[in-house]
Image: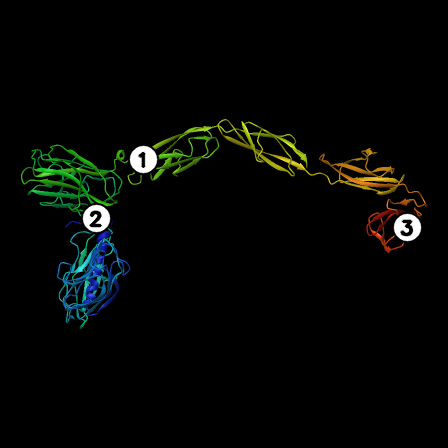
Amino acid sequence: MKTKSTKNQHSHTIAKRIRKSLGFFLFLFVLSGSFQTKAQMLVPFAGSNTLACGTNTVLRDHANFTTYANNANGFPVLDARLNAVIAINGNYITESGFDYVRIYNGAGIGGAMLLNVSGTGAINFTSTPGQTVTVQFISDGSVVMQGFNLNIVYSGACFVPCSGAPGANSVITPTFQICPNGSTSISLLNTYTTSGFTYSWVASTTSPVGPFVAVPNGTTPAINSGSLTVPVWYQCVITCTNGGASITTAAGSVSVAATTTNSVPYNEGFEGVPINGTLPNCSWATSSSSVICQTHVVANTLGRLPRTGSKFAAFFFSPAGTDYFYTNGIQLNAGVTYSAGLWYRTESTGFTNWTDLSIMVGNAQTPAGLSSIVSSNGPAVSTIHKALGGVFTVPVSGLYYVAIKATRTASGANYLSWDDLSVTVPCNLNTPSITVTPNSTVVCAGTVLSLAAAGGNTYLWNDGSTNPNYTTTPFNSGVYTVIGTSTLSGCSNTISQSILVNPSPAVSVLVSTPAICAGSSANLIAFGANTYFWSNTNVGNIISVSPAATANYTVTGTNQFGCAGTNTIQVKVNPLPNVTASASNTLLCQGDALTLTGGGALTYQWSSASLLTLSNPVNTNASASAIYSCTGTDANGCSATAQVPISVNACLGTNKISSSSKGSQVFPNPNYGEFTLEMTAGSKLVEVMDLSGRIVLSTTTTEETMKINIESLAGGIYYVKIKSENVTDVVKVIKN
């Protein structure tokens, strides 16, 4: 028998065999006379599963005793083997009269119904010895409840213990080659009807006589080979634990075939296969009502010839029926349109016994599930090579097989031959719909252009970029082209997008004065665009600015296309000088010498009502009280002004010459440190201060006349301050 040769099929077969082996292991564990516990088992929503004899467990509905679903109809088979008793105890909560827990006699739901309950209640059921039962749960299309929770407990024995040496046994291995990296099930021919056996598998990759090594986890009657790339021989040592007698089977072998092809484009010209032989494993498969498909060289009789190369394939007609030829597995993708085709011819006599020739596709190397791609729609008759082909899609991605189906009557020409079978992807039928969406079809020079490609899996732009989201900064109009490719089909499509690039203005900016003094202003002038907007929110090509400190100003100019350009200019701000103005004395008598001194600048100008000079310092005579202003200019040409007030009195000698408007008088004045102070009546605070404002003498009095002595003080001008409750008076005193 031929076998399939694809990774997916082998994976499926492996999984199936592992499940089978695991179930067999559980079965044999029970044969040993010991019961095991399985944490829990769920009734499938649909379909069935099996609980091995001797396995105690908790059986629950498909929702694990929470809230089951509508339209459930599943059932597990509880295996009792020859003599085990099964106890089923627990509770159920279902929709009364609509959702049921049922127990049937035997394996499946075709036997007699032993129990049928719904609503809320308890189940207490015990089988007869050796009675296998089936538990079914069925729900309707509305109202769901909690479900059920049942304890499954085995008692008795599934089988009786063995004695003496195990009976003769042998190893079952596949009669066909498995495909590279595939796996297969290795098992024993005979099943023992007693319990108490142990199994120990060994394997050799050298020869049927070893050396052998233990197979990992090889302790069950059936094991899985795992992935194989070379031939392997297997033996099993079987021991009856009651006495320890053992037998060793003869070695059984597993053969591994050559690697196969499973990609598109798929082409088969039959050149690399045996001559006039049957089709090898892991390459093709056939099924026939007659002889299997064969390969040939040159002409046998009546014009049978290869189309290309030296070999071809053929069906032989005897008797009437249908022949199938299957390719090896080919990976196909949903959403792709494929083309399948071949060249065929019949014997030159032109008999019409080949009533139909079809190309089909399916997911297994069997007639079941095949879908037609193309048919000859009548007798396949041609004395020259004739093409037959069509296109097809598959519903889901996966491994598929292309089949040649030929139906014939029992009479007529002997052979239907074909050559050059192929499966390809016609890109004219799989052109991906590629789109390009720009952020704008009109952009300004120097701005970012974004182009988003879609519809493919990979992309190639005309500058070599492979990102579907393409960005650039163009300065000239142009055409942008992308090739989008579908990874499913391998087909590509090209699309272009034209982009108009308008020029951006070259904006220039000037400043009327590169540097200004603090508090001054400068004019900024922009040109090169149509409209202008400044960073300080002003608009227009000329603006006036008065920054407090050095600052940058940016202007954005926009042209007639709406494109913008920018430029930045700096206005430097020099600080004002810290100008000071001082006098040799600020309280003078008429005619006293006065010196005015400015500081903190490079050049100076003094001014008052009677004075204007560029000299510094300034020497003059006091004539009247005045405020003298000093304007200083630094090296940057920045100016600041400081002022000094000068008070000038008449100073009339020893008489009561120094008086105030409030009535206080001092005499003699000037003096040599002793003088008389006349004041108004009342309590007073009398303070004598020097020109800096420092109090050098302080006293209180209620007298209207008092003597004051300042002989210990240096000569100069002093002030006497008289403070009463409501009046403050100041009188100047000159000490010689």
Q: In this orientation, which residue lies closer to the viewer: 130 or 142?
A: 142
The three-letter code of the residue at mark 3 reads Leu
Helix, strand or loop at disc 3? strand
Element carrying mark 2: loop
At label 2, the amino acid type is Ser
Q: Disc 2 designates what residue?
A: 5
Mark in front: 3 vs 2:
3
Judging depth in this view, the residue of 164 and 103 nearest the camera is 103
Q: Which mark is residue 445?
A: none
User: Residue 460: horizontal and vertical position, in percent?
Assistant: 37, 36
Residue 736 image position (x, y, % from top left):
92, 47
Task: List the residue tagged with mark 3.
Answer: 677
Amino acid bearing label 1: Ser
- Compared with residue 114, is residue 460 higher up or lower down, i.e. above or below? above
Q: Secondary structure at mark 1?
A: loop
Residue 496: x and y in percent read 37, 31
Residue 345 drawn above or below residue 151: above
Q: CA distance from mark 2 to mark 1?
A: 36 Å
Marked residue nearer the N-terminal end (3 or 1): 1
Mark 2 neighbour density, 10 Å: few (under 14) some (14–19) many (20 or more) = many
**Residue 48 visible:** no
Residue 398 falls left or right of residue 375: right
Report the number of discs: 3
Mark 3 surroundings: few (<14), some (14-19) or many (≥20) residues within 10 A? many
Q: Which mark is residue 433?
A: 1
Going from N to C along the chain, the mark reached first, 2 or 1, is: 2
Mark 3 and mark 1: Cα distance apart in space: 114 Å
